[in-house]
């Protein structure tokens, strides 16, 4: 059976498109490419990938080659009517194909085991510790040592080992920053740890903004549960922490300003039921919000907004942080991020008589953007 020319052309076209798509998936400069590791953990994981990949290519070529050779060499020739001589058992071959796979397994297993112990080992004692809490559908970052609680943007100093303690408030999530390390499950009632270092020699410019996302289907807004990792110099990181504490103790805006009106709206329209703008809430308070939600009350753990104005993105990495996007969010969060808990629970979005006015929204935006 031979293909007609048009379908052959179609096949060639289809194949080239497939090859281009596959190659595109390996573009190192892509924001979430694992082929551009920025630190020792991701580098080791890439090395492992390469070893296993090329071992598999080797096996594929040897086995496929032997198969093709045999099929061609021993095919039935014209005029041949007898069944060829039948053989059974061949000691050198049997020994050969017992040893060869064992060698291939060793090549794959030895570096895998070494790297597993390496990556899962205790991080050095001077590691910066961050507690990561997954929520439907945003990320909370708590720095116990620095007394900072923030959301959706993880700031870390360059070249410093980072230790993450990961847990979830609700369902199973998965923490993934492809350029720093492989995925780690984020499980309720359990703490998983993860370590990595964003290493300077691999990063061109600081601050470097890396992309992360939830990698385990966790409900309706799962695809919108993203975050950023901001890698900065130690000095900038210290400045970021100091700025957080300055903001946490800054008195609320007063007088006849937009910001002051925004703060009034923030305090009077129920935003404070879930959000905080004056530093970290205690673990007990955050737990009480979770319990309230479970009891069916209209409260829920929400992103800490203390340094909200200094972020680059909003709504869990969904959109850039700017006035237009913030206004869009405050007007109709469900339209921006369908299913999110703020739209489902906050009185101003569920009670038609409590809708925020345009003035209130614009004042709220001014207030929130001033938190930097
Ligand atoms: Cu998730």
Image (cartoon, rainbow, N blue to C red):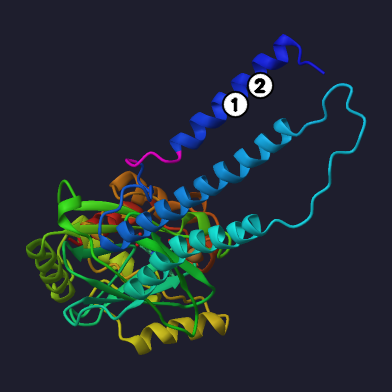
Task: Determine whether the residue tagged by mark 2 lies in a helix, strand or loop.
Answer: helix
Name the outermost residue toward the left. 235
Q: Is residue 330 left or right of residue 234?
A: right
Q: Quadrant of the C terminus?
A: bottom left
- In the rendered image, the vertical position of residue 154 relative to residue 145, given as above or below: above
Name the outermost residue toward the top. 5
Residues under numbered marks 2 and 1 in contact, where contact means CB atoms less than 8 Å apart: yes
- In the rendered image, the vertical position of residue 161 relative to residue 329, given as above or below: below
Alpha-carbon span between mark 2 and mark 1 = 6 Å
Image x and y of residue 204, in percent: 16, 46
- Front position in the image: 58 or 232: 58
For residue 82, say whether it is visible: yes
Name the outermost residue toward the bottom. 284
Instruction: Indicate whether residue 27 is drawn in magenta.
Output: yes
Residue that numbered label 1 is attached to: 15
- Front position in the image: 171 or 339: 171
Instruction: Indicate whether residue 222 is drawn in magenta.
Output: no
- What range of the chain is rendered magenta? 25-29
Task: Determine whether the residue tagged by mark 1 lies in a helix, strand or loop.
Answer: helix
Tell me the quarter of the picture where residue 74 sits: top right
- Front position in the image: 257 or 89: 89
Residue that numbered label 2 is attached to: 11
Q: Residue at x 34, y 86 (%)?
A: 283
């Amino acid at each position: 059976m031979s293909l007609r020319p048009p379908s052959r052309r179609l096949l060639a076209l289809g194949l080239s498109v497939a090859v281009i798509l596959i190659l595109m998936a390996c573009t190192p400069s892509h924001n979430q490419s694992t082929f551009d590791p920025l630190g020792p953990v991701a580098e080791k994981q890439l090395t492992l990938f390469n070893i296993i990949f090329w071992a598999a290519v080797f096996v594929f070529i040897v086995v496929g080659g032997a198969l093709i050779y045999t099929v061609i060499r021993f095919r039935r020739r014209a005029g041949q009517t007898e069944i060829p001589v039948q053989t059974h058992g061949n000691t050198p071959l049997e020994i050969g194909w017992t040893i060869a796979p064992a060698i291939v397994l060793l090549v794959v297993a030895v570096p895998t085991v070494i790297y597993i112990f390496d990556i899962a080992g205790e991080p050095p004692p001077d590691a910066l510790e961050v507690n990561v809490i997954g929520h439907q559908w945003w990320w909370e970052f708590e720095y116990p040592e620095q007394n900072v609680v923030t959301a959706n943007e993880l700031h870390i100093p360059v070249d410093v080992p980072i230790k993450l303690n990961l847990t979830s408030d609700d369902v199973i999530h998965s923490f993934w920053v492809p350029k720093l390390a492989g995925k780690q499950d984020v499980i309720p009632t359990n703490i998983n740890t993860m370590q990595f270092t964003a290493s300077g020699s691999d990063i061109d410019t600081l601050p470097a903004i890396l992309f992360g996302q939830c990698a385990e289907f966790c409900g309706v807004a799962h695809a919108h549960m993203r975050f950023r990792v901001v890698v900065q110099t130690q000095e900038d990181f210290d400045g970021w922490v100091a700025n957080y504490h300055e903001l946490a103790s800054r008195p609320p805006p007063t007088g006849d300003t937009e910001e002051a009106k925004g703060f009034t709206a923030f305090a009077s329209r129920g935003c404070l039921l879930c959000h905080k703008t004056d530093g970290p809430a205690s673990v007990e308070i955050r737990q009480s919000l979770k319990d309230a939600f479970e009891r069916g009350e209209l409260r829920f753990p929400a992103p800490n907004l203390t340094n909200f104005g200094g972020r680059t993105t909003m709504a869990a990495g969904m959109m850039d942080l700017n006035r237009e996007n913030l206004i869009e969010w405050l007007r109709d969060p469900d339209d921006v991020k369908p299913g999110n808990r703020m739209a489902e629970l906050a009185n101003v979005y569920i009670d038609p008589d409590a809708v925020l006015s345009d003035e209130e929204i614009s004042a709220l935006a001014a207030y929130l953007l001033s938190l930097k």
